Amino acid sequence: MKKEPFVNKEQLEKITKEYPTPFHLYDEKGIRDNVKALKEAFSWNKGYKEYFAVKATPNPYLIQILREYGCGCDCSSYTELLLSQSIGAVGEDIMFSSNDTPAEEFALADKLGAIINLDDITHIDFLEETIGRIPKTISCRYNPGGLFKISNDIMDNPGDAKYGLTTEQMFEAFRILKEKGAEEFGMHAFLASNTVTNDYYPTLAKLLFETAVKLQRETGAHIKFINLSGGIGIPYRPDQTPNDIKAIGEGVRKVYEEVLVPAGMGDVALYTELGRFMMGPYGCVVTRAIHEKHTHKEYVGVDACAANLMRPAMYGAYHHITVAGKEDAPCDHMYDITGSLCENNDKFAIDRMMPEIELGDLLVIHDTGAHGFSMGYNYNGRLRSAEILLCEDGSTQLIRRAETPEDYFATFDSFPIYETLKKNIEDAKK
Ligand SMILES: *Cc1c(COP(=O)(O)O)cnc(C)c1O
């Protein structure tokens, strides 16, 4: 399938007059349509709630859009908790799904009334010592170990993942938590990432539901919710078929009616903690071709780099690239598209067949709306870009300014060198 950007050349030329490249651009309409479809797909479940995985796209203005549809926040750190609090997501609107958690983070999560999802059995005592009690509602993250398969396809390797409690530990943890005063229980598992199959959630749900029935029966703990977590993927490549969220919702419903309802557990609420699926396709990086280089290969240098989008450098991840205005031109040139870091893996594409690129062309790097900006870093003194929202009415709204050298040096603000750094920034502008 041909991948079309959500923005065209005319729009981009207008936007780049106001905001210099590179920047992350987000599609309000896409975000809204998708969250509506998700809610609809799970509307059969009375307590259904999506907790957006804040780490994927930690911008309060974007998450606020999801809040309009009743979404909460899935947090895993102190600053993510603060960000959620700033948009009014507190109490049971926060799912605190962290691991290797520092005490002060449990304390803040508890102070905000978040639902705490424990990653390990030893965290029961750690939490109790930290906040002085066990909350009435508590969740545990499950890791069944082994390989996670759908039919014969290996989806991922939970046995090698650092997260969660074993099956035996789940039973023991629920007993201990109940003794210590917990009244409502949740179960969580995240067994495969970026799945592009409608079978992931239903397969995961079956495993969780069957375990939940045994857990409730054997420990007497009342299971209030089951959290299917994240992992629904997006088609980064043009040849991939997008997930059908309606089919996924139906698949989960079938298993729910097969396993939970006959066990008298038809009151269990389902939660999700999707990140990539909620935002991934509705963000792109807009960058300009600033150099071409003809050596052992053909290179096009752009003004974005891995500091703006780390996935290709980190995982060799594919991100489709469209040259604005050349959507229908033949892909008869092979390029490496590079950033400026002094790292040879700073390439957004390698040996990619593309239309002929001229200096000044605007390139749209697709599907960067999740785990894009948020993975940014400052290597080589590179600065993070702005984030801009393309609103439903076609206007744009700056939702995060670009970093400045002042931001880069801000952590020296209590050191003698800071005044010199600031003076040099000013002098350089003259
Ligand atoms: C990262 C993460 C998610 C979101 O994952 P996606 O692949 O973006 O859907 C959800 N829950 C937890 C605990 C996570 O760590």
Image: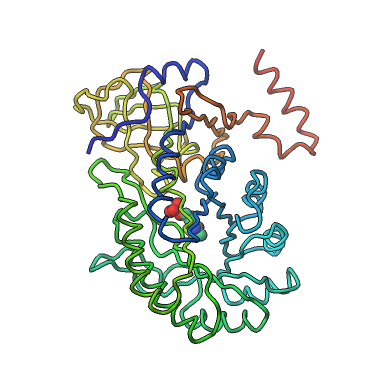
The x, y position of residue 156, in whole percent, is: 35, 64
Question: Colour scheme used in the picture?
Answer: rainbow
Relative placement, left or right, of 320 versus 225 is left
In the rendered image, the quadrant that contains the C terminus is top right
Q: Image quadrant of residue 2?
A: top left
- Residue at point 50%, 47% (across, down): 56
The x, y position of residue 277, in whole percent, is: 41, 48
Q: Nearest the camera: 116 or 291?
A: 116
- Residue at point 31%, 62% (across, down): 251
Check the image and name the residue furthest to the top.
430
Q: Is residue 324 above or below residue 180?
A: above
Q: Nearest the camera: 318 or 95?
A: 95
The x, y position of residue 163, in whole percent, is: 50, 68
Number of callouts: 0
Q: Image quadrant of residue 6?
A: top left
The x, y position of residue 145, in whole percent, is: 41, 74
- Residue at point 47%, 58% (across, down): 272
Q: Is residue 148 above or below residue 303?
A: below
Q: Nearest the camera: 152 or 341?
A: 152
Q: Nearest the camera: 23 or 389?
A: 389
Relative placement, left or right, of 118 versus 421 is left
In the rendered image, the quadrant that contains the N terminus is top left
Relative placement, left or right, of 250 versus 30 is left
Relative placement, left or right, of 77 versus 8 is right
Q: Is residue 420 above or below residue 141?
A: above
